[in-house]
Image: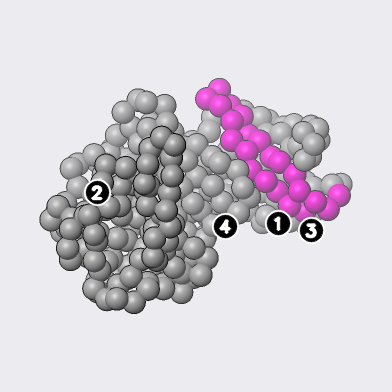
Amino acid sequence: MDYDDDGMLDIIVGDRNGFMHFYRRTSEAPITLTKEADIVCGGVTIDVGYNAAPVCVDWDEDGERDLLVGTQGGEVRLYHNDTIDTDPVYNTYTFLESSGTSINHYRNCPQVLDMNQDGKKDLLCGANDYRIYYYENTGTNAEPVFSGSESIINTGSSGARFWVDDWNEDGLFDVLASNYNGFVQVYIQQNTGVAGEGAAAVTRSLSADGNPFYTSVTIESQGFGQGTLTVYDMSGRVLSEEPFSGSLLVNGSNLARGCYIVEVRDAEGATALKLMKL
């Protein structure tokens, strides 16, 4: 994003230790970046504890870009920009709330966009509990209000991280997600709007209940039709293949300890995730 409003895209990076780094682009060809001082609030370097996850957005629609930061503790901090986009200045922060209580998802990774296309910014949060949560804005675009959330995607493993884009260029927001397993999963939105108004996203997801496992693990899916479930070893060799219709208990008692890949495929495509036998 163009953090300093100079017409060139910069990079804002949150790190494991809770700080945020600003890499300013100084030329386009060749692309060069200069590391600036870490981002500060009230003259003090911002430190959210651990696992800072920043996103820049004009939260209050005053024409100046503000800063949201997800934290390991689970809150989402809002830093208001008190000056101009060419030189953002933050003096205080507040916590985003839902129904009067601070939003909290351990190792929160937020994104902001108009998910249901009603002209108001909504909030998505990737969490450590496998899931991506959707908060519909029931206020206005300049004064967002949240009154609860729904889990729209289960990524199948801890540390859900994601990006939203129109992957298949059909005019609807899709979600690219990853997690501790390391795979990138693509969730294609089928409908426009929000559940009850015409849902935020009909997703295709795969999860493993009881993973890592000792003897067996249950594979469950959302948004898949009749298909097949295939288990591979890490070299790509097929170990088993069975019909799949939403949920299946996979018996892994004959498998050696280690990592495996399970893939579910139907007429619309395939999704895979990593299994670990202990």
The kind of residue tagged 3 is Leu
Which numbered mark, 2 or 1, is in the foreground of this view?
Answer: 2
Q: Residue 102's image quarter?
A: bottom left
Q: Which residue is mark 2?
A: 5
Q: Quadrant of the C terminus?
A: bottom right
From the top left corner, tell me how far across and down residue 136 is, in percent: 27, 52
Number of the label disc, if any, that sits on residue 158: 4
Which range is magenta?
A: 256-277
Q: Residue at x 54, y 29 (%)?
A: 225
| First in sequence: mark 4 vs mark 3 | 4
At a point 51% along the width and 53% down the height, the residue shown is: 160
Residue 17: which numbered mark, if any? none
Earlier sequence position, callout 2 versus callout 1: 2
* Residue 118 inside the magenta-drawn segment: no
Question: Quadrant location of residue 80?
Answer: bottom left
Circle 4/circle 1 CB separation < 8 Å:
no
Residue 49 visible in this rendered orientation of the protein: yes
Q: Closer to us: mark 3 or mark 2?
A: 2
Mark 3 or 2 closer to N-term?
2
Q: How is the image coloured?
A: one colour
Front one among 139 and 240: 139
Q: Where residue 90 sits: x, y (%)?
A: 25, 68
Q: Can you identify the residue that label 1 sits on?
A: 212
Disc 4 from disc 1: Cα separation? 11 Å
| Residue pointed to by mark 3 | 278
Q: Foreground: 210 or 5?
A: 5
- Marks 4 and 2, Cα distance to the nearest angstrom? 36 Å
Q: Secondary structure at mark 1?
A: loop
> 127 left or right of 216?
left
Q: Is residue 265 magenta?
A: yes
**Mark 3 touches mark 1? (CB < 8 Å):** yes
Residue 266 higher or lower than 247, as above or below: above
